[in-house]
Image (cartoon, helix red, strand yellow):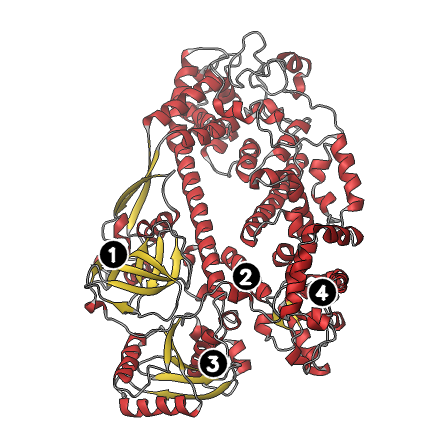
Amino acid sequence: MSTRPRRQAATKKKLIIELSDSDEDATAESKDTDEYRPQQARALDSAAAATAGVAKRKRWPTAQDTAADAPAAKKKRGKKDANVENDCPNQSNPETEAIEPPRSLTQPDGAASSATTGRSSFWERRKVWNIHELLAETENIQPTAARNIVQLFENENTIPFICRYRRDLVDHLPPDRLRDIRNTYTEIVDLRKRAENIVTQLERENVINEEIRDELMCAKNNEELEFLYAPYKPASKGTLAERAKALGLEDYADRLLYGTAPQVKLSSIVDPSNEALASETLVLNGICNIIIHNISKNTNVLEELRRLQNVHRIVLMCSKTKESAATKATGSSSSSKTTKSSAISDRKVDSSKFENYFNFQGDIKTIKPHQMLAINRAEKHKFISVKMDTSDYLKRDLSRFISEQYMSQGLQYPLRRETFTRALEECITKKLQPLMCRQIRTDLKEKAQKAAIDVFAKNLKQLLLMSPLKGERILGIDPGYTNGCKLAVISETADVLDTGVIYPHGVRANKRAAEQKLVELLSKHTCQVIALGNGTACRETEFWLTDLFHAGILDSRSIRYSIVNENGASVYSCSDVASKEFPDMDTNERSAVSIARRLNDPLSEYVKIEPRHLGVGMYQHDVSEKTLTESLKDVVSECVSYVGVDLNTASLSVLKHIAGLSEKKAEKIIEYRTDKGPFQSRKDLLSVRTIGEKSFVQCAGFVRIEPLSVGGRLKNPLDCTWVHPESYKVAETIVAECDLKLSDIGKFSFIARIKEFAESKTKLDRIAKENKLPMERLEFVLVALQRELLQDYRADLDKRPLFKQGLTRIEDLSNCDVVTGAVTNVTHFGAFVDIGVERDGLLHKSHMKNCDLSIGDRIVASVVNLDKKRQKFGLRLENMLAETDTSFTFKTE
């Protein structure tokens, strides 16, 4: 039998870093010089440290070892000679193998031999890894960067802080990439803890030796760890295998499975006085159940099963389910409450959304994340049934492999062959194939959920970083029918100036009074911008506004309106945050304020709402809420920190998301400035209770002291820049070298002189050497000094709000119409675009010309796949728009 490719490849990996004495010395040396090395890292990585300086581990037991140490040996077949290292682990070698005498599996006075697990020599080539080593290998990053990342995370450094002020230590990785690496780091830490817990448990039970302990600590993912743990995991009480073992059939089953002497005769086991052993058939059934259990727990078999599922083609097949009896006759008294509630739930979901999967099949290697999410949701609502179709080749290869594992050695006689053949067939059908299908579904689900979280995080970041509309008074409209359209006017600084309600629609409609009230508010407060929520009655309100423009009641040359994402406005209006902000305001009017503020400053308003309520993403409701919440919390903190806030004016909702701060710390900051007046400098933060040195280091670079909040004069102008307090000395040195003053920061002449200084490599090298500062951090200080004072980070992204100048109904659209619009959501299968009609159109990935769109992008598109009956239409990308105020819809001649 030839060596299998996977095993051969596994032995040639170059990324596995073996911990040696020299490595340990280097580690010890670096502890004194690296300020970011975590104090608890040594304890956390004790498993890896335990192997440092240890001599080469003993090889797997040979036949001679087994004979010399009979009490500690199991009754299974012997292993190959240690010198035959390059042979296939499962290939028989008659010169070095010996048949062991049968003995009981119970070993009260010794550890289990590793020969019982069926492991290959692949595992003995592994070394116990350090956390940073496995992180470097898994994420394909430099070992030095991986070590730094581990130390930074152990010291509780936040991702925004690392990406801005420690990026030289992490190879300038972007925040999104670093967030993925941190998730992997967390998984690795959990894996190490899980392995240590398993080892502790098995050592307490006295069932493993040092070799198997090291193997468990070498596992590089949860799957490998579970494979290695499987032979020692106790079976559930009451299983067929456990019942058979209780009858004393375990010894006979092992003799048949491994071919050890003496031969088994069923007639000698039959016990007429025991009902469960009254016949040879019952005895054989019990023996087969034990053999099935042992085969299904063999590590080599599980490893081979995983390899085969990656080699052979496996198809996921979906088919439409028949209408359930509960749906056909919901009034039937025989139907259970669960069935009735399920039927009601299913009827609430439109099954037509999943019609693409009523007769669907796809290779598990090519199926897309959004397809898997849709399939899982459709299956959950019982619209479809899902199964895996595996080829006969896979079953044949697996049968051949298992047969070679067990039947290639030992005593050969008819009863053994017949029993093994029967047990093998049942094991594959009842155990291994279902296990493989569960593993595949789990893997596909995890990949799909990760993709959904990534899409949501990317869209949320783009939504939060939309450019604010500064210097404008805004009238927010929360449209509605019965309760009318709620109005709220806010000032340039987002203070509420006026509120009201009008009724242009519904049974209480009074369009004349509504027109007068709207015009009165606009003229009274000199307001020229309208923010219209995109919820219920949005289109009707939009048509009404358009009629007012056409009639000349509203001046289209001066007044503009924009459709604003309303998702979460109702959640905000009922929240504690809204109650504290507007204790005397009606709940409905609060939502109008929120809509207006979303146009004024999207970031400051969206952070008040839980991200999952914002309506940007892909099947986010099917994702683990905890995982999604943690990821989105990181994104919000990332965005708020990058934009930065004024320490004296920032609200609690914004301040608590700054890197290094929490809600409790933000409350103490607001309490401090309320009692003692505005902060005069960043260092005043250290006077706030709960703000220690560590919190200060993390947050100081993301909060600023703006001149207007302290009466126009700053103690230190650097407090209004991106320069971190730890680099103030360097910044002052640079300013002095340029013959400038700190008070000139932000001026054109100051920026020009700093830019000129930055081109002098000799001076930079000298300053970096004098201050013992990496060149990358010095360069960042220069970049920070070249920014305009109070420059908004979001201005760099140029995602301005879209103001409409015309609109169309879906009924007025036709194929090939050319329209303009704004991207409102991005998924793996395409993007959704608001073109000014009742529904967003789908721009499928196949029609995107390989463009990478993001929320807020302006595009020109042509209409395709128009379905007026179902109110759906598709788009094809024609061009990207640079300007925002273009004609919104136009026909081709």
Q: Is residue 207 visible?
A: no
Q: CA distance from mark 4 to mark 2?
A: 20 Å
* Figure quadrant of the C terminus: bottom left
Q: CA distance from mark 4 to mark 3?
A: 35 Å
Q: CA distance from mark 1 to mark 4?
A: 54 Å
| Above/below status of 102 relative to 769 | above
Residue at horizontal 64 percent and vertical 18 percent from the top: 61
Using the image, tell me which numbered label, if any, was put on residue 633: 2
Q: Identify residue for label 1.
A: 352
| Above/below status of 353 relative to 215 | below
Going by the numbered disc 1, the residue's amino acid type is Ser
Q: Is residue 302 visible?
A: yes
Going by the numbered disc 3, the residue's amino acid type is Glu
Q: Earlier in the sequence, mark 1 or mark 4?
A: 1
Q: Earlier in the sequence, mark 4 or mark 2?
A: 2
Q: Are marks 4 and 2 in contact (CB under 8 Å)?
A: no
Q: Judge depth for marks 4 and 3 and give the one in front.
A: 3
Q: Identify residue for label 4.
A: 696
Going by the numbered disc 4, the residue's amino acid type is Phe
Q: CA distance from mark 2 to mark 1?
A: 34 Å
Q: Judge depth for marks 2 and 1 and give the one in front.
A: 2
